[in-house]
Amino acid sequence: MTNDPRANIGSPTPEELREQVEHTRNELGQTVEALAAKADVKAQAKEKAAAVKGQAAEKAALVTDQIRAKAEHTAQLVKDKTPEALREKTSHAATQVRENASRAGQYAADVTPDPVLDRAAQAAAVARANRVPLLAVAGAALAVFLLVRRSRGRRR
């Protein structure tokens, strides 16, 4: 016994032949599309670049979160172990530094030419408007730096 449908019937009808031809055409079209996709190196490179970019962004966000958590934890430990008298002196010194920095900034603004101030204001506005991409780039750069540093440490 065979499972060949042609063995069970005589010759196929014209309608059956049309269906077989249409089915074969569909399969051939799908095969050609699959081969064309495999041959499109540019599209594959774009997809790979997008995937790598996404992975880098995820890694940068993860590393940023880890660093932020560790910094908060460390700051809390330092605060807990620092005597109150030292914290008060540090607070007073920080206030003086802020005041002196404010005065120095005001002096710099007073003596800086207006065109330079205008350019600085424009640069600051662009940075504020593009805060997320700048942070993403900074995070990615930090991740690359840490990975390079880590890999160099393993070689020694």
Image (tube, rainbow, N blue to C red):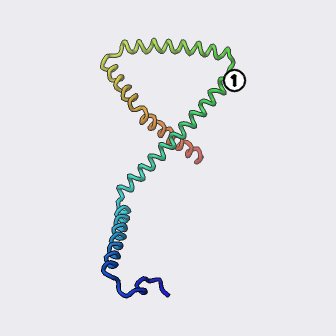
Instruction: Give the SS element for disc 1.
Output: helix
Q: Position of residue 39 (x, y in %)?
A: 35, 62
Amino acid at the residue labelled 1? Lys
Q: Is residue 40 above or below residue 113?
A: below
Q: Is residue 78 left or right of residue 5?
A: right
Q: Residue at x 45, y 11 (%)?
A: 103
Q: Of residues 33 and 53, which is closer to you in this image? A: 33
Q: Of residues 35 and 100, which is closer to you in this image? A: 35
Q: Of residues 79 and 152, which is closer to you in this image? A: 79
Q: Is residue 155 left or right of residue 23?
A: right
Q: Of residues 148 and 7, which is closer to you in this image? A: 7
Q: Position of residue 19 (x, y in %)?
A: 34, 75
Q: Residue at x 35, y 72 (%)?
A: 23
Q: Position of residue 45 (x, y in %)?
A: 39, 54
Q: Residue at x 48, y 86 (%)?
A: 2
Q: Is residue 101 above or below residue 6?
A: above
Q: Position of residue 87 (x, y in %)?
A: 64, 17
| Residue 73 found in image quarter | top right
Q: Residue at x 55, y 46 (%)?
A: 151
Task: Say which residue label 1 marks.
Answer: 81
Q: Residues within 10 Å of mark 1 (few under 14, many from 20)?
A: few
Q: Is residue 53 above or below residue 73?
A: below
| Residue 24 found in image quarter | bottom left
Q: Is residue 82 above or below residue 135?
A: above
- Total marks shown come to 1
